[in-house]
Image (spheres, helix red, strand yellow):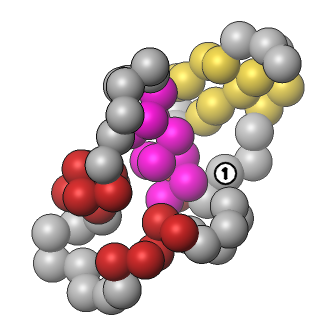
């Protein structure tokens, strides 16, 4: 698949040298998961890290298909 590279300052991600086209929340979610690679991450932890604490919406947001964030 290739190596994942994250440029946090520029908010860019690439795999194997190919830049990924990500929406802001998709990038934030990728960073949250990559920072805990190899760990089981709960929905609650992801919601707290990626979505604003004042965000109001269904807790099933993470159950949607990729690209729907």
What residue lies at 52% left-to-right and 33% top-to-bottom? 10
Mark 1 nearby-residue class (10 Å; few <14, some 14–19, many ≥20): some
- Residues rendered magenta in the picture: 25-34
Q: Main secondary structure of the magenta part?
A: helix
Q: Is residue 57 left or right of residue 15?
A: left
* x and y percentages locating residue 34 in the rendered image: 47, 27
| As drawn, 12 above or below 17 | below
**Residue 17 in view (yes/no):** no
* x and y percentages locating residue 46 in the rendered image: 32, 52
The residue sitting at the bottom extreme is: 57
Which quarter of the rendered picture does the C terminus lie within?
bottom right
| As drawn, 28 above or below 23 | above
User: Which quarter of the figure has residue 43?
Assistant: bottom left
* x and y percentages locating residue 25 in the rendered image: 49, 59
Query: Per the image, is 27 magenta?
Result: yes
What residue lies at 72% left-to-right and 26% top-to-bottom? 14
Query: Per the image, is 43 magenta?
Result: no
User: Which quarter of the figure has residue 44?
Assistant: bottom left
* x and y percentages locating residue 8 in the rendered image: 44, 29
The residue sitting at the left extreme is: 53
Q: Is residue 60 left or right of residue 7?
A: left
What residue lies at 75% left-to-right and 39% top-to-bottom? 20
Q: How many marks?
A: 1
Q: Is residue 2 left or right of residue 5?
A: right
| As drawn, 48 above or below 34 | below
SS at badge 1: loop
* Disc 1 target residue: 22
User: Which quarter of the figure has residue 17?
Assistant: top right
**Residue 46 in view (yes/no):** yes
What residue lies at 46% left-to-right and 48% top-to-bottom? 29
Which quarter of the rendered picture does the N terminus lie within?
top right
């Amino acid at each position: 698949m290739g190596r994942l590279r994250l440029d946090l300052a520029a908010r860019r991600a690439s795999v194997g040298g190919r830049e990924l086209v990500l929406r802001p929340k998709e990038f934030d979610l990728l960073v949250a998961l990559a920072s805990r690679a190899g760990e089981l991450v709960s929905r609650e932890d992801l919601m707290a890290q990626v979505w604003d604490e004042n965000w109001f919406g269904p807790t099933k947001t993470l159950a949607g298909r990729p690209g729907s964030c």
